[in-house]
Amino acid sequence: MAERQTSRYDVHEFGATGDGETLDTEAIQEALEACAGSGGTVAVPPGEYLTGPLRVGDLTTLHLEAGATVRFVGDYTEFPTAESRWEGWDQVGFHPCLLVDAAETVEITGRGTIDGSGEYWWQFRDRPRSAYPDGLRERLEEFDERNEHKDDVSSFTLRPPLLQVYDSKNVSVSGVTLRNSPFWNTHVVYSEDVTITDVVIENPADAPNGDGIDVDSSSHVRISDTFINAGDDAICIKSGKDEQGRAVGEPARNITVANCTVEAGHGGVVIGSEMSGDVRDVTVTGCTFTDTDRGIRIKTQRGRGGVVEDLRFDTLVMRRVACPFVINGYYFTPIDSEPEPVDGTTPLVRNVHFSNITAREVESAGFLAGLPERRFGEITFEDVRIDATRSLEATDLDPAMADGYEQRHGFFCKSISEVSFSNVALRTPDSTAFRFEETDLVSIDGLEVERSDVEEAAPTEETAAPAIEIENATETRIRGCDSPSNGETFLSIGGDASRRLSLAGNYGDLGSAVDVDADCDVTLE
């Protein structure tokens, strides 16, 4: 065969039909293998290409022209067994639909569509395994035998992700639409220098485990100018689960998310709950989240271990989310529990900063819950506006997923070492806008609270609850706040652990609006 004189590898030249009925797996894969290492481009012209799983190699650009759809076949027999990471554990499962594996300098580009035919896989979710086809049941039993780690959802989550970038470097994805993933839509794992930009990600609201983009034990990842409508978490950052995740010890780090639009899903940007290998150095800016259950959500639990630290969220707009800010150390576990010994399985969240954020039509302002044995800390809010007057029944949350805030409109903080609010405004129908429990340092500067259930006239018994309630905070600092005009209590502080209260630089006679029921040193300036 004569030496090829072009860097363009048209899949039609390798026998692909693009008729939507013929299985084009062999032809497309042959084109990808011919291109691998050449720095060339595999071109997919307009048409619908039905295919089994595909693998992209080094120095390859896969370009889907406008009008081209690569649709993965709904047939488990076409998907071989592959080693990868599912839900934080390295194990075997079904081969990803489109896989970039141990490759460098790869691009996936164009205005075409990659469709995972997820509805084929989703149909098995609510069926007992005895109702699965015999061959599928046998495959899952094989996975069970080979996989060391199991939980209630392990077998079902071994479905193929739509696009997986695994153990690769210098990979970019741009322009394409990625939709209907059997499992997570786009999974970046054990990889470095990955760019996802100008991409559309679409999964139905009922797609099980239908995350948009999961960045997993990877570094120097950039996600920008992307639209996500996902059935689960829109952008999720992970680093392995429990003992195995800690042993692997590969953090998710140096990650930026910019100018993304999220419509629906469980969370706009979510960290965890698989974060045992650490998550650090994350910046999220210039994004909008609409109709998501949460805005920013950090979730973990005892047994995970790992540290989540040095995160910054800036210039965000949220609307119709259940709760814009969640940091939860009790994911799927009861929040009221006694302290336990601190060891390598105890997680930690620290140095998390929120600024220039507007959240409107939300149900609960925020929920921060560390662990009593290891308080989460150094959490700041600056220039934040929250309108938490939406009905608590507006979003139907699974009680196991509700993070404990479903009974509150206001902001709840517990077991936090240090939390501060600067130039924060909160509108809520509840009498108590902020409640702090078991916190080392509460710092409030320039807080505005509007409570729609409090009359301008003298408060009644029903509306006399303070705007801020503090129970067992070692030190509380209040400055730049106005004394209530109707004589209501602004701050109530109690608990045996409350020691110091400083009121400095406030307006009006704020001291007379403070109720202290603790052996607490009070400083007025």
Image (cartoon, rainbow, N blue to C red):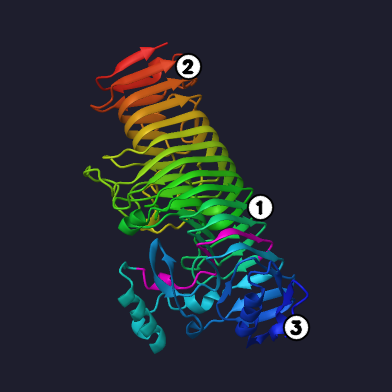
Instruction: Provide the secondary structure element on which disc 2 rests.
Output: loop
Residue for point 46% across, 22% down: 486
Pinpoint residue 331: horizontal percent, then vertical percent: 35, 52
Pinpoint residue 99: horizontal percent, then vertical percent: 55, 70
Task: Give amino acid for label 1.
Answer: Asp
In-image side of 120 versus 41 (left or right): left
Label 2 – label 3 distance at C-alpha: 83 Å
Q: What residue is pinned by disc 1?
A: 225
Label 2 – label 1 distance at C-alpha: 42 Å
Mark sitting earlier along the chain (2/3)? 3
Judging depth in this view, the residue of 335 and 97 nearest the camera is 97
**Residue 514 is inside the magenta segment:** no
Tell me which segment is drawn in magenta: 153-176
In-image side of 23 versus 435 (left or right): right
| Badge nearest the viewer, 1 or 3 | 3
Mark sitting earlier along the chain (2/1)? 1
Pinpoint residue 240: horizontal percent, then vertical percent: 39, 57
Residue for point 45% across, 73% down: 159
Label 1 – label 3 distance at C-alpha: 43 Å
Q: What residue is pinned by disc 3?
A: 2
In-image side of 493 versus 74 (left or right): left
Dot 3 crowding, Cα within 10 Å, few <14, some 14–19, many 20+: few
Q: What residue is pinned by disc 2?
A: 506
Task: Kindly give the residue lying farthest to the top in the view shown.
Answer: 525
User: Which image quadrant: the N terminus?
Assistant: bottom right
Task: Kindly give the residue lying farthest to the front in the view shown.
Answer: 2
Pinpoint residue 426: horizontal percent, then vertical percent: 50, 34
The answer to which image quadrant residue 107 occupies is bottom right
Task: Give amino acid for label 2.
Answer: Asn
